[in-house]
Every structure is written in structure tokens, then in C-alpha cells.
Image: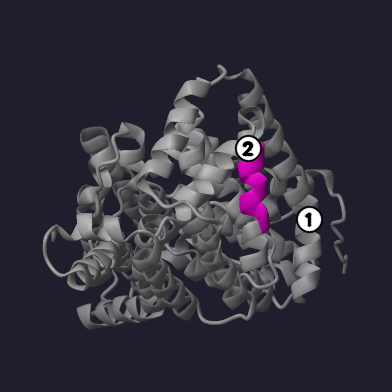
Amino acid sequence: MRKPTIFLSLLTMGVLICLIFATIRIFKDEALDGGIQIVLLISAAFASSIAVFYCGIDWKTIEQRIAKNLLDIAPAILILLFIGALAGSWMMSGIIPTFIYYGLHLMHSNFFLVSTCLICCIVSVMTGSSWTTVATIGVALLGIGQVQGFSVGWIAGAIISGAYIGDKMSPISDTTVLTSTVTDTPLFTHIRYMMYTTVPSISIALAVYAIAGYTRTTPDTYQITAFAEALKDNFNVSPWLLIVPVVTGILIVKKLSPVVVLFVSSMLAILFATVFQPHLLREISGVVDGNAIIACAKGALITLTGNTQIETGNETLNALASSRGMGGMLYTVWLIICAVCFGGAMSASGMISVITELFLRMMHGTISTVGATVASGITFNLCTADQFVSIVLNGDLFKEAYKKNGFENRLLSRSTEDSITVTSPLIPWSSCGMTQATVLGVATLTYLPYCIFNIVSPLMSILIAAIGYKIVRKVG
């Protein structure tokens, strides 16, 4: 087998980026409805052609690598489907409308973005999951912010910034545990060391959100009041509905499987929907004069699996109360599968290793070492479209280089999290980017400029390296 050249490896990445750019220019917000998926397959075909005709790798090897990658992401796909069910059931049961109703009365608009970021931070640290945080409290906060007059970009940016602090820092977060394991760094050593880049990054984010909240035009209180009344007119708002998120939180703290937690939470929400919102389930089912039990059962199944739309008399609430269930996540699943095909072709051909070697050559001093790690992490995110694969690759490939250059493992673990975990939702074709865009109903490129924490984190990692604060290097 012949090793691919750096030119061919970068050319393949260039083909992908150019095709994605052209697709976004042509299709705009609809690019993720099929255009980017096809682009990923075309790029995978381009990478496979180089692997077969230049490197001499047989097609069976490429197929096996793609199949292995698909097997690795199977649990994530299952979680995605259940997140769709959770989003639909929490909406139609009245749980999210209840959060929104109380939130409108408690959250001051000037502090809304700051409060949103902090709330998502607390929830994600407690749950260890950015996906669950965004799909539950994040959706509710999006509704509150829209009523208060904020653009969806700002709201989604604050939600994702807060949610990924927990994903990065929580001791029960899968990415935190994985990164510390791959880099041979004790878990709490890893978490404590990340504080040096996380605290300045979130401080900058909160300052930006505070300024954005104070400098905006004061919202029309009549619109807020009208929206709150529309919520009460169409949903049975009750504090009893908050039992479901409390039970969900307990299950998460008990460290049950995410699939189990999401399934139980969705079923419990549907049960509450039959008690508190039977009129909505009948409306969704389309069965007006038939058996009430059959109508509710049909409405519940549609809520979990398909598109739901109710007429509330309020245009903003109509858009908010719509949900797409498990079926709404299929575009995300499609995208992930296509991204895995591209990542498998890149990996089987050896192009990812060639690109990594390019970064390894840059590693000399502290700044170049951390800078190469950050750049490599973002590149892996772009290539593999999966943060878990990227973390494993980054940790494995740089571990020996850090040891050789006298740097501690905790520096590698921090640089990996700063570059991979927090930037994963900023890539439209990645599993995280597509999931958050689908759940929130906000395009990745729309919220990207407002994810201040996610943007600042990798830059802060390099800045702290340049300062040299708390970085120990063994000489000799």
C-alpha cells in the first residue's frame, strides 16, 4: 500500500469544504435537508478513489472501516431518536409550556441571556449531558427568549454555551471521562486543570451576553402578557407537570443509561399528557367524535413519532408548540451516517494520519504544541463529524509527543477538550451540530456567531499556553 501525500489529504478536505460552502450558498437554511448529506457522500467517494487507485487499498477495507464507525455511533443514533420523542412529549404534555409560563414571570429580559447561559450550565453540570440540557430546559428557554424579543441566534448561542460547559466540566460527562481516560489523566486533575481556561472563557461569554441584554430595545410587555395568556388558554399549566423533569433528573443522577432515561421520561410525559392535555391529544389525532381512549392513544403515538401542530390563536405559540418527534430526527441520522462514510474513507486511506503528522511537525515550544493540538482537534471534528472519535484520535496520537517534549498529560487533556468538545456543535454536519440545530429549530450557522464560550475556549487554550500559566515542562 502506498501512503497518501499531504497534498492529496488536504485536497480531499478542500473538496469537502468547497462543496459544503457552495451547497450552503445555494440552499441556505435548507442545506441540511439533503444537500450536505450528498456532498459528504461525494467527498467520501473522492477519498475512496484515492485510497483504491493511488494507495492500493481494496474496497472491502474501506467498507469495514465505515461499518466499524457506524457500529460505534449506533448508541448515539438511538439517543437521537429518543430525544425527538422527548421533545415532542414534553411539549404536548405541557411541561415545556409550564416552564415558559413561569419563566416569563420570573426572568427579567435584561438578564435573560446571562440567566439562560447560567441555567444551562448548572443543568448540564448536574446531568453531564449537553444534549439532554438543550432538548429539555433549552427548548423552554428558547420560547421565553423569543417572546421577550431576542433573536433565535442569541438565545441558541447562550443555551449552547451553557450546555457545553457541563459537557466539558461535569465529572459524569462522557466526553470528560473519555478525555481523561484516553490521555491517562486522573479525572479530577483533568477537571481542575480545565478551570484555568474555562473560567476566563465563560466570564467573557457572560460579559458579552450581559451587554447584549442591556443594549437591546425593551420588549413590548403587552406581547409578553398576550403570550402568557395564550399559554394558559391552550395548555393546562400546572406545577404538577414539573414532576417529570424532577424524576428525569433523579434518573440521570443515578447514572442510568441515557436511552433508559429518555425512554422513561418520554413515557411519563405522555402519561401526564393524557391527564392534563387530553384535548390536545384529541386535536392531534384528528378523531373528534370517536372513542376518547383511542383518540388519546393515537395522539400520543403521533406526538412521539411524527409532526404535531396545534392551533392556539397566537402565531408565535403556534410555531413554538409544533414538534417533529422521532421522525424529525431522521435528517440528523441521515447526516451522521453520511459523515461517518466520509470519516471512514479518510481513516482507511490513511489521510487522517498524514494530516496529523503535519501538526506533529509543528510541535516545538509550548505555544506550538498546544496550537497544534487545538488545530488537530478541530480538524478531526471536521473530518470525522464525531467528538468521541476525535477525542480518541487526538489523545492517542499526541500522547507520546507530549511525553517526549516534557509536557504533562493534563495539558493534553485540557487542550483536547478545549478544541473538540466545545467546537463540535459549531460544525453543521457533525452529530452535535445537527442535533442541536434540529432540537432547537435554529440552523447551526445562525447560532454559531453567538456561541461565545465555544468560540473563545480554543483561543483561550492557546492564550494561556502563550502566558505559560500553570504549565510545567520537564527538561531532559
Sequence-wise first label, 1 or 2: 2
Identify which amino acid the numbered label 1 is placed on: Met
Q: Amino acid at mark 2?
A: Met
Residue pointed to by mark 2? 107
Q: Residues within 10 Å of mark 1 (few under 14, many from 20)?
A: few
Q: Is 206 or 51 nearer to us in this picture?
A: 206
Q: In this view of the protein, can residue 4 be seen by the observer? A: no
Cβ atoms under marks 1 and 2 closer than 8 Å: no
**Which SS class for mark 1?**
helix
Instruction: List x then y, in percent, for residue 19.
Output: 26, 44
Q: Say the numbered circle drawn on residue 28.
A: none
Q: Give the labeled residue for mark 1.
A: 195
402 up-or-down from 420: above or below: below
- Residue 141 seen from this side: yes
Query: Within 10 angstroms of label 2, few (less than 14), some, or many (20 or more) residues?
Result: some
The boundaries of the magenta stretch are 113-122
How far apart are the alpha carbons under marks 1 and 2?
Answer: 28 Å
Helix, strand or loop at mark 2: loop
Q: What's the coloring here? A: one colour
